[in-house]
């Protein structure tokens, strides 16, 4: 796991995020769900659920997957979870117009007077799109505003962002957003958020620098307010203390949020690195001090909870890279995450030591590096960097290319190199390619595809399977224990992780003596209350469906559209056109059949199928001619039905069928 982001592309634009991963979500009891849905949900939380496809879906948005809400909110612990309905949930913009027919839980209790509500809108049961709302005394403070990346079945979806419906309903109450660090799963949704909500965003220098360049890209203005780790803030009724943390990006902070209802600690993403590349370790003194004052509820990063021991220090990479550089006479290409400035610094230091020039490849790599140098987070000796287009004149043994694409992202620089589509880098026999990151779950296939293409062109490839060339940015079990021990929270709430991570993190806390009843396992959209040192999961929920962004559209595609795209991609499209004389009800021309992505029409036998389709459509039309063809919708439905049966019988495929009847 451990990796911090992956990128996808659409039309050349690349974005970065930490991870989107599989989620094992159990169904709540009492929900009727088809087996197909279950398996879909088991596989991945944000995955569009597959069900029997309605051809009509292409023309009319059919209510889709009514059980989805429950499957998502049906968290790990069924005893805890309410997963109920609430007014306002239907405002969700994913075409999920209809929710399930299940009755809402009997009268969820109204909010407790004087309690602090903690509302995870994203980041639970998934790795990605972190966002948590804290509401106290009619004011809302938001921590993080991240995105997630689509999985391979979300055709055409660029990014996935949290559901802002709850925030929209309470827009006037929102005081500010505080961002813990600059990874995409914590800042990626800020442009979408700031388009709708005019509230200040607080973050450290690098974090705000990264947010700013995202905003610029999308032409959004924001009120960005810089803070320093260690600084205290007062935002409305919230008192916030920021604590320097170590993670795979510089300038990360954890937060202590104090309200009259109690104090919450939010770890953000962290690992405990005693020897971070930038020299600033986690602020243990402050953590101990805050722990001493008393923490009522601790929210803790779960990403790496399944790993025993400690995550290695970033310094561990030094000798490994050094070894590789010393023993390599050819060109070296290293893929890593652009935002892992520490890693890039390690690579630069090693390159300088071995007297190699450095070229950067990939849009986000250039962008982040420029920012990091400008803000002083990255040191590059003068004369070390060369333009990628100028590398031809440099001997191979004097060159390192640092590139994006360590997750095999299809449009990334490394993928383009592997598929010989890169403008200026062509893989040569003997090139040494290093993928310095471990695969984010779900990316294994694309990575192995890239690795194979590189090997096929004669490159040597070092990746996680054969060498330890990545260290994680997230806390392993022992580090989580250290943080819990320093803070001694009364209540514990594992966040940022798939359910298996959350549960393991909960078990770690229980091992350290936090009573089981004080540990919260929740799902996105659940509402947790804190008052007088007691935290509880309420039966109230807020909308927390994934919202899909495709091009300029935000939330205008939902599961129905995705289902169509999936169906089109799997079985193609058949269009039947006929012209009808409305006065007589007779067919005056057609039917004609055209197909896309259905069958290769030149292949022997294929034209027979197309002809059979045509004849079937004709027979259907003739039956209607006798009735006068009054109800065009009925004619279309009949054509679809008849063709669907025929095509399935002949090909076992289920293409999208669109009958078009025009008046002649
Ligand atoms: Zn992170
Ligand atoms: Zn994260």
Image: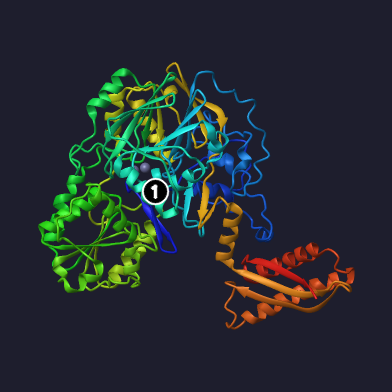
At 38% from the left and 55% from the top, the residue drawn is 7
The residue nearer to you, when weighing 408 against 516, is 408
- Where is residue 630? Give x, y as percent: 86, 65
Q: Which residue is mark 1?
A: 19
In the picture, measured across the screen, residue 25 lies left or right of residue 591, that is left
Residue 441 shows up from this direction: no
In the picture, measured across the screen, residue 330 lies left or right of residue 500, that is left
Secondary structure of residue under mark 1: loop
User: In which quadrant will I find the C terminus?
Assistant: bottom right
At 24% from the left and 31% from the top, the residue drawn is 283
- In the displayed image of the protein, which residue is found farthest to the top? 532
- Where is residue 456? Give x, y as percent: 30, 72
Residue 266 shows up from this direction: yes
Q: Is the CB of mark 1 within 8 Å of ligand 2?
A: yes
The residue nearer to you, when weighing 414 against 199, is 199
The residue nearer to you, when weighing 309 against 243, is 243
- Residue 515, by quadrant, is top left
- Residue 327, by quadrant, is bottom left
């Amino acid at each position: 796991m451990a990796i911090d982001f992956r990128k996808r592309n659409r039309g050349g634009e690349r974005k970065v995020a930490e991870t989107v991963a599989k989620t094992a979500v159990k169904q709540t009891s009492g929900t009727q769900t088809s087996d197909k849905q279950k398996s879909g949900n088991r596989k991945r939380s944000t995955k569009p659920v597959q069900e029997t496809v309605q051809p009509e879906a292409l023309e009319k948005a059919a209510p889709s997957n009514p059980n989805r809400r429950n499957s998502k909110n049906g968290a790990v612990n069924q005893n805890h979870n309410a997963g109920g309905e609430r007014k306002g949930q239907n405002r969700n913009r994913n075409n999920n117009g209809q929710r399930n027919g299940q009755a809402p839980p009997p009268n969820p209790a109204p909010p407790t007077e004087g309690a602090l509500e903690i509302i995870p809108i994203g980041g639970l049961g998934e790795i990605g799109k972190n966002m948590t709302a804290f509401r106290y005394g009619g004011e809302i403070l938001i921590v993080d505003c991240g995105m997630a990346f689509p999985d391979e079945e979300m055709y055409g979806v660029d990014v996935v962002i949290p559901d802002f419906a709850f925030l929209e309903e309470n827009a006037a109450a929102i005081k500010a957003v505080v961002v813990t660090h600059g990874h995409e799963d914590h800042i990626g949704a800020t442009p979408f958020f700031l388009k709708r909500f005019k509230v200040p965003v607080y973050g450290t220098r690098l974090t705000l620098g990264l947010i700013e360049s995202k905003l610029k890209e999308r032409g959004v203005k924001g009120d960005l307010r810089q803070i320093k780790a260690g600084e205290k803030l007062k935002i409305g009724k919230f008192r916030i203390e920021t604590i320097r943390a170590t993670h795979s990006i510089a300038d990360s902070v954890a937060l202590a949020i104090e309200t009259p209802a109690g104090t919450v600690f939010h770890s953000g993403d962290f690992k405990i690195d005693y020897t971070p590349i930038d020299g600033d370790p986690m602020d243990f003194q402050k953590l101990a001090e805050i722990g001493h004052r008393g923490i009522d509820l601790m929210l803790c990063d779960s990403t790496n909870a399944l790993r025993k021991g400690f995550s290695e220090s970033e310094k561990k990479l030094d000798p490994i890279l050094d070894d590789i550089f010393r023993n390599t006479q050819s060109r070296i290409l290293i893929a890593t995450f652009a935002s892992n400035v520490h890693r890039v610094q390690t690579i630069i230091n090693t390159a300088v030591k071995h007297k190699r020039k450095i070229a950067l490849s990939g849009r986000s790599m250039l962008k982040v590096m420029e920012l990091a140098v400008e803000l002083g987070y990255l040191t590059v000796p003068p004369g070390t960097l060369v333009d990628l287009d100028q590398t031809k004149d440099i001997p191979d043994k004097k060159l390192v290319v640092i590139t994006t694409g360590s997750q095999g992202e299809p449009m990334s620089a490394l993928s383009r190199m592997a598929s010989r589509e890169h403008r200026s880098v062509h893989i040569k026999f003997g090139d040494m390619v290093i993928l310095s990151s471990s695969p984010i779950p779900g990316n294994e296939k694309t990575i192995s595809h890239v690795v194979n293409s590189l090997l096929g062109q004669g490159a040597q490839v070092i990746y996680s399977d054969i060498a330890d060339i990545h260290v994680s940015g997230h806390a392993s079990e022992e580090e989580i224990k250290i943080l819990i021990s320093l803070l001694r929270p009364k209540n514990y709430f594992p966040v940022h992780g798939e359910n298996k991570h959350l549960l393991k993190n909960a078990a770690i806390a229980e091992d350290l003596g936090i009573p089981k009843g004080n540990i919260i396992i929740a799902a996105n959209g659940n509402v947790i209350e804190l008052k007088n040192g007691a935290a509880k999961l309420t039966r109230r929920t807020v909308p927390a469906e994934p919202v899909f962004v495709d091009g300029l559209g935000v939330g205008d595609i939902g599961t129905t559209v995705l289902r169509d795209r999936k169906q089109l991609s799997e079985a193609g499209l058949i269009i039947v056109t006929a012209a009808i004389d409305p006065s007589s009800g007779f067919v005056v021309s057609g039917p004609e059949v055209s197909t896309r992505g259905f069958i290769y029409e030149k292949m022997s036998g294929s034209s027979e199928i197309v002809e059979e389709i045509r004849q079937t459509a004709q027979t259907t039309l003739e039956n209607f001619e006798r009735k006068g063809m009054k109800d065009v919708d009925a004619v279309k439905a009949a054509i679809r039905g008849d063709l669907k049966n025929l095509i399935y019988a002949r090909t076992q495929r289920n293409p999208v069928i669109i009958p078009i009847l025009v008046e002649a």
